[in-house]
Image (tube, helix red, strand yellow):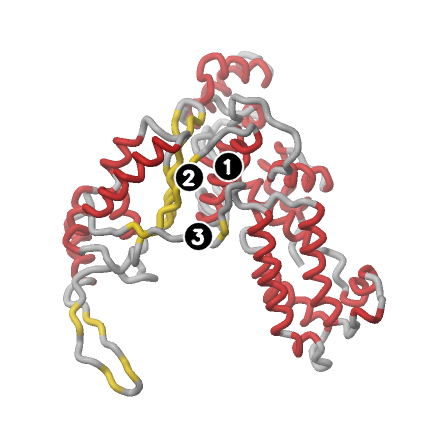
């Protein structure tokens, strides 16, 4: 269902005097699973009641409408799907695809054909060809340079045309997507069978037979376009370790271990008397927490994980304050000395809430929004903590509701600024 269409329907029903609950009932009856959520209906009903005329999105300064990190969007796709399938003990089969030297092996003649199929302007295509015409590489050994080697395939990584690879893969997978469209995980009226981000891909199916067929066809299609799929023993998807339980405790434990190594490597910095306490605190947040908290927006935090994260933070704060563990000084006193009232858990929750606010403001037809509102048909089992639990707890502690996300000033004020 198009967002402009449902907003027009909401506006019409508001003018007729219908309540948000009545509007939601009407939309569910007509549009079924593709109808917007009650939170969205309530927001737009309030907007039109106040006299709003426009059906389009508000312009947001400083960020494009479809912004925030694409890798997090892909992670949330996968995390939400796995989390909800696991919660009802429903099988979901995934295959993570690793393309061997993906950027370096693309045949350029096939790339030009792919761009032509996408109706790229002829003059623009000519300019792109010129950029890759007569490219040479040189090998340096010591102070000696080899003779120039002409390169006839591959793309420049970090090039100012990053969409070339995406465009090539999109054309390469056209036929495969048509063959596999009936398969995948049913989400409302559609099926989700693949997620792509640059050269990272995950294929999804309801059973092993479908997945085997999809992977066989995918291998043939990639080979046809000059790309090779390799088989590996373990896989990192967008920088995160993926297990049968999704992106969970194993990923957080690895991040914590990496953070501990950074703290140990910078031991002389923490004990340096010539650096101010404020500088040490900021260095800890930049050098240690940037490693520990990478991708924390999608973490489902348990009490044990919170304790471990706090231990890493207190390790560098304690050393920075010049206090050894033998000093038996409590954490509250260390925080007072370092002027660090905000904890690493607060900062993880803030990052999660910032992402969640963006998720709620997404159009209804975006996959992250649809997966967030989707529930498997089976009844959910009790037990395992979910990402939603973590977010709801963070919202409750800051007196936030979903509707507040549509007021950016309120949402930003309540989530606060990271120190």
In the figure, is residue 281 to the left or right of 360? right
- Residue 180 appears anywhere in the view: yes
Q: How dense is the environment of label 3, judged by Cα within 10 Å: few (below 14), some, or many (20 and up)?
A: few
In the figure, is residue 345 to the left or right of 39? right
Please tell me which residue is depicted at 25% across the width and 48% down the height of the picture.
Answer: 168
Above or below, 415 relative to 342: above
Please tell me which residue is depicted at 60% across the width and 26% down the height of the picture.
Answer: 380
- Considering only order in the chain, which callout, 2 or 1, is on the residue closer to the N terminus? 1
Q: Secondary structure at mark 3?
A: loop
Q: Position of residue 282 (x, y in %)?
A: 65, 67
Residue that badge 3 annotates: 234
Q: Nearer the viewer, residue 92 or 279?
A: 92
Q: CA distance from mark 1 to mark 2?
A: 10 Å
Please tell me which residue is depicted at 55% across the width and 24% down the height of the picture.
Answer: 41
Q: Are marks 1 and 2 in contact (CB under 8 Å)?
A: yes
Which quarter of the figure has residue 220?
Answer: top left
Residue 368: give its label.
none
Q: Nearer the viewer, residue 133 or 308?
A: 308
Query: Split into 4 quadrants, where in the image is the N terminus?
Result: top left
Q: How dense is the environment of label 1, judged by Cα within 10 Å: few (below 14), some, or many (20 and up)?
A: many
Q: CA distance from mark 1 to mark 3?
A: 18 Å
Residue that badge 1 annotates: 82
Q: Position of residue 67 (x, y in %)?
A: 46, 46
- Considering only order in the chain, which callout, 2 or 3, is on the residue closer to the N terminus? 2
Q: CA distance from mark 3 to mark 2?
A: 13 Å
Residue that badge 2 annotates: 94
User: Mark 1 or 3, which is nearer the eye?
Assistant: 3
User: Mark 1 or 2, which is nearer the eye?
Assistant: 2
Q: Secondary structure at mark 1?
A: helix
Q: How dense is the environment of label 2, judged by Cα within 10 Å: few (below 14), some, or many (20 and up)?
A: many
Please tell me which residue is depicted at 16% across the width and 50% down the height of the picture.
Answer: 110
User: Mark 3 or 2, which is nearer the eye?
Assistant: 3
């Amino acid at each position: 269902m198009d967002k402009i269409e449902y907003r027009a329907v909401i506006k019409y029903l508001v003018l007729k005097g219908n309540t948000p609950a009545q509007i939601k009932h009407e939309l569910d009856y007509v549009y079924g699973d593709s109808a917007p959520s009650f939170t969205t209906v309530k927001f737009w009903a309030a907007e039109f009641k106040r006299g709003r005329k426009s059906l389009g999105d508000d312009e947001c300064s400083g960020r494009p409408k479809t912004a925030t990190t694409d890798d997090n969007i892909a992670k949330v796709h996968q995390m939400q799907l796995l989390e909800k399938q696991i919660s009802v003990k429903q099988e979901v089969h995934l295959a993570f695809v690793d393309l061997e030297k993906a950027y370096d092996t693309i045949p350029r003649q096939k790339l030009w054909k792919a761009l032509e199929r996408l109706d790229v302007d002829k003059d623009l295509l000519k300019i792109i060809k010129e950029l890759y015409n007569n490219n040479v590489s040189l090998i340096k050994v010591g102070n000696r340079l080899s003779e120039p080697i002409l390169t006839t395939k591959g793309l420049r990584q970090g090039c100012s045309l990053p969409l070339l690879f995406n465009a090539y893969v999109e054309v390469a997978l056209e036929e495969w997507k048509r063959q596999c469209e009936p398969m995948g995980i049913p989400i409302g009226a559609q099926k989700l069978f693949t997620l792509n981000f640059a050269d990272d891909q995950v294929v999804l199916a309801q059973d092993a037979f479908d997945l085997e067929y999809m992977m066989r066809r995918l291998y043939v299609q990639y080979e046809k376009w000059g790309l090779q799929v390799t088989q590996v023993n373990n896989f990192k998807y967008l920088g995160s370790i993926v297990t049968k339980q999704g992106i969970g405790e194993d990923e957080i434990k690895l991040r914590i271990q990496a953070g501990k190594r950074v703290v140990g490597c910078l031991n002389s910095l923490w004990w340096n008397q010539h650096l101010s306490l404020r500088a040490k605190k900021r260095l800890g947040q930049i050098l240690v927490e940037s490693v520990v908290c990478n991708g924390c927006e999608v973490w489902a935090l348990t009490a044990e994980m919170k304790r471990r994260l706090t231990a890493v933070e207190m390790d560098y704060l304690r050393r920075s304050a010049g206090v050894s563990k033998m000093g038996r000084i409590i954490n509250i006193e260390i925080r007072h000395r370092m002027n660090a009232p905000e904890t690493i858990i607060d900062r993880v929750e803030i990052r999660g809430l910032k992402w969640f606010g963006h998720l709620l403001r997404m159009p209804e037809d975006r996959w992250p929004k649809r997966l967030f509102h989707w529930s498997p048909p089976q009844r959910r089992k009790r037990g395992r903590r979910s990402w939603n639990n973590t977010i709801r707890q963070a919202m409750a502690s800051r007196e936030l509701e979903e509707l507040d996300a549509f007021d950016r000033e309120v949402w930003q004020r309540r989530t606060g600024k990271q120190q």
